[in-house]
Amino acid sequence: MSLQNIITIDLPLQQTNQFFHISNLLALNLIQSHSDDVKNTLNTLEPNPKDMHIIVHYFESPLTSLQQIDSDLLNTHLHIAICPKLTTELEVTFISSGFHCNMQADDSVVDKINSIKQVQAKEISFSHKAISRYVLQKKRLPSFTNRTKILALTTKKEQQILGFIWDGHSNEEIAHRLGISINTVKMHVQNIYKKTKIKSRGQLFALAG
């Protein structure tokens, strides 16, 4: 099996420059792509069934964006998620979704290289706390399935609110990020509870955390 390429998807300029440096250090080719063009990017590469690529996804709002990824893509190659802020709940979601590693955008180059080396060795790279929580939750209905069901019952604005909640943000933080009042956030949260028959944030995480 050959590991020759790092394919970045929707990576911001600062992260792209950093990954150019990382790919040079690891003697890997860096290929830039976008979420709506990644399949075409893969098709243009040498169609060698033994080739395995590292695909690096950047998520500004991870839980909302995850719903749009083709599950077939996650079943092939090695996948790394990068986002502005990681929480244990978010790490568990990445594990459940089939990712091999996650990174916080401001992680050092050394930390990122070490994580990529683990992925190259066909190992996963997540915090011990996230792995432990994932193992303990395996007896439950897979969180990704639950989240899909919950999102299907809600509006786009409510899905955006849900994404922030699952990312670990408080109502105050959500209001600040969206530029709306905290009362508006609370109204959306209550609407989510009514539509999904969920009674609390804790239940949201228990069902889809």
Image (tube, grey):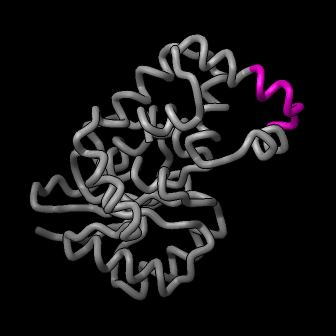
Residue 170: x %, y % from top left: 72, 45
Residue at (36, 56) in percent of width and height: 133
Residue at (22, 41) in percent of width and height: 139
Residue at (82, 38) in percent of width and height: 175
167 lies above or below 112: above
Q: Which residues are magenta?
A: 178-187
34 lies above or below 157: below
Magenta portion: prevailing SS class = helix
Front-most of residues 112 and 21: 112
Q: Quadrant of residue 120?
A: bottom left
Q: Quadrant of residue 208?
A: top left
Residue 163: x %, y % from top left: 59, 37
Residue 141: x %, y % from top left: 28, 32
User: Is residue 142 visible from the viewing direction of this image?
Assistant: yes
Magenta run includes residue 99: no
Residue at (36, 42) in percent of width and height: 40
Magenta run includes residue 181: yes
Looking at the rendered structure, the number of numbered marks drawn on it comes to: 0
Residue 206: x %, y % from top left: 43, 37
Front-most of residues 25 and 68: 68
Front-most of residues 195 and 26: 195
* Left or right position of 154 against 122: right
